[in-house]
Image (tube, coloured by chain):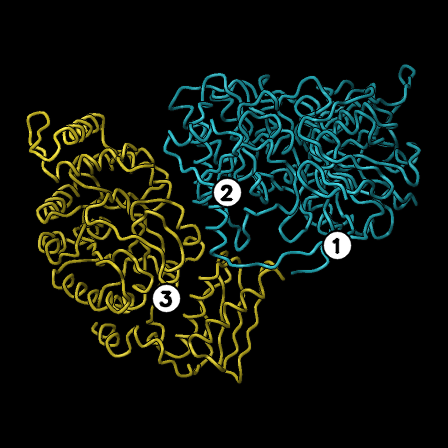
Chain colours: A yellow, B cyan
Amino acid sequence: MGAGQSTDRRHGPDAQANRGEMRLKREATAGSVDRSDALVRVQPGTGLAVSVRTRTGPMDEEHIATVVRDALSGYGVENAHVEVEEAGAYDHVILARLEAALSRSVGSEEPFRSPLPRPDRQPTLRDRPRRTRLYVPGANARLLAFADSFGPDCLLLDLEDAVAPSEKDSARFLVRRALATMDFGATELWVRINPLDAGGADDVALVVAGHPHGICLPKAEDPAEVRALADLLSSVEAAYSVPWPLWIMPIIESPRGVLAAADIAGASERVVCLAFGAEDYTREVGAQRSWEALLWARSQLVASAKAAGIQASDTVFPNVEDEEGLREEARRARELGFDGKGVIHPLQIAIVHDAFAPNAAEVAWARGVVEAAAQGGRGVVAHEGRMIDRPVLERAKRILEQVGEGTDAD
Amino acid sequence: MPTNAVGREIPATVAGRALRPYQGAFATVPAGRRAGGPLKTIRPREDKVAPSLEDAIRRSGLRDGMTISFHHCFRDGDRLVLQVVEACARLGIGDLRLFPTALFPCHEPLVRHIEAGVLTRIEGSMNGPIGAFVSQGGKLREPPILRSHGGRWRAVACGEVEIDVAFIAASEADPWGNANGIHGPHACGPISFSVVDSWCANHVVVVTDHLVPYPAVPPTIEQGYVDQVAVVDQVGDPAGIVTGTLRITRSPTQLKIAELAVRAVEAAGLVRDGMSFQAGAGGISLAALEFLSQRMRATGARAAFAIGGTTRYLVGMLNEGLVGTILDGQAFDEEAIASLRANPRHQPITPGFYADYNSLGCATYMLDFAFLGGTEVDLEFNVNVNTHSDGQLLHGIGGHQDVASGAGVTVITLPTLRGRVPMIRDRVTTVTTPGEVVDLVVTERGIAVNPRRSDLAADLRRAGLPVRTLAEMKEAAERLVGERRKPVFGDEIVGIIQWRDGTVIDVVRKVEGWR
């Protein structure tokens, strides 16, 4: 698993300028002709030949050929035949497919572990609201095409369960380019990598160039894994000049993970949230999925997270059609102490946000706190007989922000 | 060249026909009297049934240079247009002007008859291959004229288009020509588009595959206007009416747009008792109906009426009591047709009732809100539904102009990108519906409010909805696909887009190259 890390040190992203010629070794393809995707085929040749077939005829051919030629020149490819067949793919999708094909042809991802143009993106706070984490499969150009428009609190680009083994490399390139290109607004961006010893280190070595906010570690069972990921992130985020500390969200989805949850939560300063994955857990303990069967694990997870001063995010609700079921489960998760919940369809977002919205009593309390603080100035202030310290005030402000009464000028 | 009120250059004449430039959505003051067909009479028990369609054509007096009309209620399942045109070809009749309400992909074989000179002019909506064919230019003696549902009714009713022979496909008819589209083995819905044709044409032939004893009811087409009845094996295939409108989309983007659209009209205070709305049969519109139903159940609000195109989803709302009355110009599935037969609150209507500019009442003027689509929208809120950004003329107007003109809040729903093609443009390729009658544009990236409607912008902001400018959404989309080449248009006009009042809102020119 150290491979990604050590190669970073030797041929790290800073080595971008050293380009000699990239020589293709064999024919390779990446991508597909599914909607919003592109199929890119590269093969060794003499000189550079780029051919483009588009769904829209003459309108896009020239532009795509230019984009491809610029990228080839950037990677030092001087002798190659490149064919692009696109089916409504955005520029960055075509680039990602080209990069995946080139890396397959040369047999290495090292030449691509370099910074990309830096996206205009803000850091996120440790304790920002994380009411929803929306999973989007990282290999699927069609599902990624509008991933910038759904507005969950956290978007989780998935390289793990949602990606077939043969597409892991290609998905990495696609997620990296999507992160580097699209404007996701206020959404916090996460990548769910593979386990560190099963491709996760390679995932990190590529996708961090897209400046996500954090990395989700699947099947977390051992605090040592979290520390290993934290070390890897320290080296990579410096190499890629990521202007914020990359957060870690361990996903607890096994009995061992649940038992180790407290240690996992406290394993690194980077851990900001524990997420629960009930599918694998249910299977491993041999339970039927029900609220009762999962109650202990959920409680254990919440207590572990809160003891470490971090957030807890509940498992996904798998039946997209059952809105009432989702609403009820989200409500119960909130009552248990969870701060948010995983969602697998954009239409689940509003329901979960609604379930985690402050109720009338909380809003009234928050208004009171903020008003009292404003009147009290710098001295010690109290509301309803209780002292208002800074965390209390911030919590009150966050509640008001959630109901659209933020103090920010609008 | 003079420009019209949306800044488009409109030549003074095309192929000898004077064009009146668009002046504004409600600027035209009509003058003159309604047109009508010639006076005729009949003796008791006289026989109207022709031995064959070919005999009916022969007896109608149809000859070179004349105009034949059709309705499109079978949509992509129509079998009549081709039968008639082929019969004309066999009879040696040519140089005809085809005046359908709309053509569909099933009509592609007409290309052969255009090339052979059987058809030399077309006026009507062209969805798909015929549109692509005439976009090449030089195919027709005069450029086709496209009209909205209301615009076509107006053109016939005021004599702008004189129909020589109207052929009216009927799923059921009696020997005297009383005809409807809701009974018989191949029912297709109200055939009310043809009512004005029956009133005004010089000769009317009802064509059916289900001749029943007198009287066929309801007589959507009335005996008093029908010259002949012809019987054929099949007038149309009802399976063709449901193309593309079968079920609610699963696309998260379309669902998101639909949800935002419904939240927008709710924020505007329009989800209330006694409301009225129009929603078509496109993917986003159907999803919007579903979300609207949810909000109506949650709030207890009930709609007084809705205007179809009708699908099973709207029928479901009628049966559930969410909607009091459906005013239905067009059926999009079998459930809609069954409901027309069974439910007196499901009322068939003519385009004259819901859409005619030269009229003292359009049902669309009573609409609180409407959800409409488009192929492009521009920074002035103008909407294109006819052409694609490559200049191809591929779609008809439908009721777009009529509904947008009438609805209190007209909501255009579309994604910012279809594949690599941006939907928000500096200027639409073709103006179908002017920004003057468009209030909101809803995309997956947010809601743009026409500056005329600052009242709506305030409502939406108060509800916490994402109000953005069209320019912002346009730039966000273009960033993902970069610069594209644009078509260079020549002088040749391959299509004339009429505004519903008969003025010209835009012309479609032939693509000569790319820049």
Give left or right: position of A261 versus B175.
Answer: left
**Which chain letter goes with mark 1?**
B
Which residue in the protein does label 1 denote?
B490
Is residue A217 at least partly visible in the picture? no
The image position of residue B350, as x and y in percent, is 69, 24
* Residue A327 in sight from this viewpoint: yes
Label 1–label 3 contact, CB within 8 A: no
Callout 1 amino acid: Gly
Quarter of the image with the N terminus of chain A is bottom left
Identify the residue position indicated by label 2 in the image: B470
At label 3, which amino acid type do we have?
Leu
Query: Residue flagged by tag 2: what amino acid is it?
Result: Leu
Nearer to the camera, B292 or B332: B292
The numbered mark, 2 or 1, whose residue comes first in the sequence reads 2
Subunit of label 2: B
Label 3: few (<14), some (14–19) or many (≥20) C-alpha neighbours in 10 Å: some
Image coordinates of residue B12 in percent, x first then y, are 81, 40
